[in-house]
Amino acid sequence: MRLACRLAAALALCTVMASAQADTTGIVSSDTIASGLQFPEGTVFIADVLYFVDYATSDVLRIARDGSVQKVWHGDGCGANGLVARGTHLLVACYDSGSIAEIALDGSLVGTLRADADGQPFVHPNDLTADTQGGVYFSASGSADTPGKVYYIARDRTVREVATDIRYSNGLAIAPDGKTLYVAESAASRILSFAIGTHGALDARHTFVELGEPGTAGSAKYTPDAVRTDRNGNLFVALYDGGGVAVFSSRAALLNKIALPAQHHSNLAISPDGKFLFVTSIDEEPGGDSRGGLLKVRNPLAPR
């Protein structure tokens, strides 16, 4: 399979993915821990409890200790897409309503953010990640008229824009040393990195890795969605298009490609002990509907 790749890391990624697509037996073993969903997203652990959202139903959900799926919160018109823990609360990225909702774990609504400090509205909030200073970064994917952006919510809940001109700003993750923010630029099939400065400022924008050149005849499509970092600084990328999860080192070397069932994989969480990945899966159905689930797969980087 001929794939157009511009960097050595991207070439390695394309080669591995091409092999996985050609040989469906390469799909790794996984357990379905939640089914009957439509468009699962926003996986995050609070202690050992896994929370996530269903964008299609605008619900915040969790996996109870008995394995059942419990509804925590529903937001009419929210379009719940991303989650992050902030203290004892959750922040919910409401893609459809252009807002960030803050909820308690009992499902009560604490507050809502709808604009930055300059009064500018958010266009399609998508994903969030917290730093160690009490702040939260979130992406706003943008529209045909508005570029994708990254915002920073400070400890005092003021919001300011810290990056722009991103082609569909999507998943975010912070390196364990707190010095680097990774951002999925989905429409460009690449991951960006930024140096984190004081008060949440971002600088030194850099292309961390390119997953392939989109729009090239005969090439596969790789669309990065959610990103997560582990305690060693490795980057896990959920591939909305591309067949699973790609894992990179902090130096952008491809470490592993996890081929998983389903057409799309929008989000992932790493278990607190680091042994497992919990990955959302989505299949498109006739008529525009979707069918989703939540998969549990062993982390290929975890010691056996």
Image (cartoon, rainbow, N blue to C red):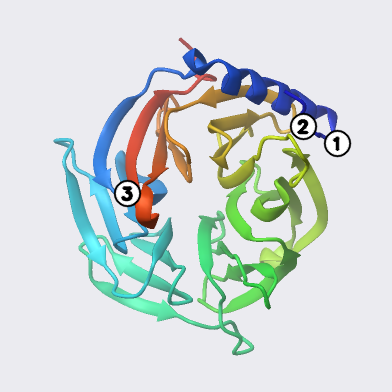
Observer able to see residue 47: no
Q: Which of pointers 3 and 1 lies earlier in the amino acid sequence? A: 1
Q: Which residue is mark 2?
A: 10
- Assess disc 1: are there few (<14), some (14-19) or many (≥20) residues with their C-alpha within 10 Å of its C-alpha: few
Q: Which of pointers 3 and 2 lies earlier in the amino acid sequence? A: 2
The quadrant in which the N terminus is found is top right
Q: Residue at horizontal 68%, vertical 54%?
A: 187
Q: Which residue is mark 3?
A: 51
Image coords of residue 80 (percent x, y): 38, 63
User: Looking at the picture, does residue 252 appear above or below residue 1?
Assistant: below
Task: Kindly report the distance in space between the C-alpha atoms of the residues bearing marks 3 and 2.
Answer: 32 Å
Q: Is residue 254 left or right of residue 23?
A: right
Q: Amino acid at mark 3?
A: Tyr
Q: Is residue 284 left or right of residue 165?
A: left
- Assess disc 2: are there few (<14), some (14-19) or many (≥20) residues with their C-alpha within 10 Å of its C-alpha: many
Q: Describe the element under mark 3 as helix, strand or loop.
A: strand
Image coords of residue 302 (percent x, y): 50, 19
Q: Which mark is residue 6?
A: 1
Q: Residue at horizontal 70%, vertical 27%?
A: 13
Judge by depth and name the residue closer to the eye, 124 or 18: 18
Judge by depth and name the residue closer to the eye, 271 or 97: 97
Q: Amino acid at mark 2?
A: Ala
Q: Mark 3 or mark 2, which is nearer to you? A: 2
Observer able to see residue 285: yes
Task: Kindly report the distance in space between the C-alpha atoms of the residues bearing marks 2 and 1.
Answer: 7 Å
Image coords of residue 46 (percent x, y): 34, 47
Q: Residue at horizontal 50%, vertical 76%?
A: 157
Answer yes or no: do the residues labelled 2 and 1 have beta carbons within 8 Å?
yes
User: Looking at the picture, does residue 246 appear above or below residue 117?
Assistant: above
**Quadrant of residue 77 in the image?**
bottom left
Judge by depth and name the residue closer to the eye, 9 or 252: 9
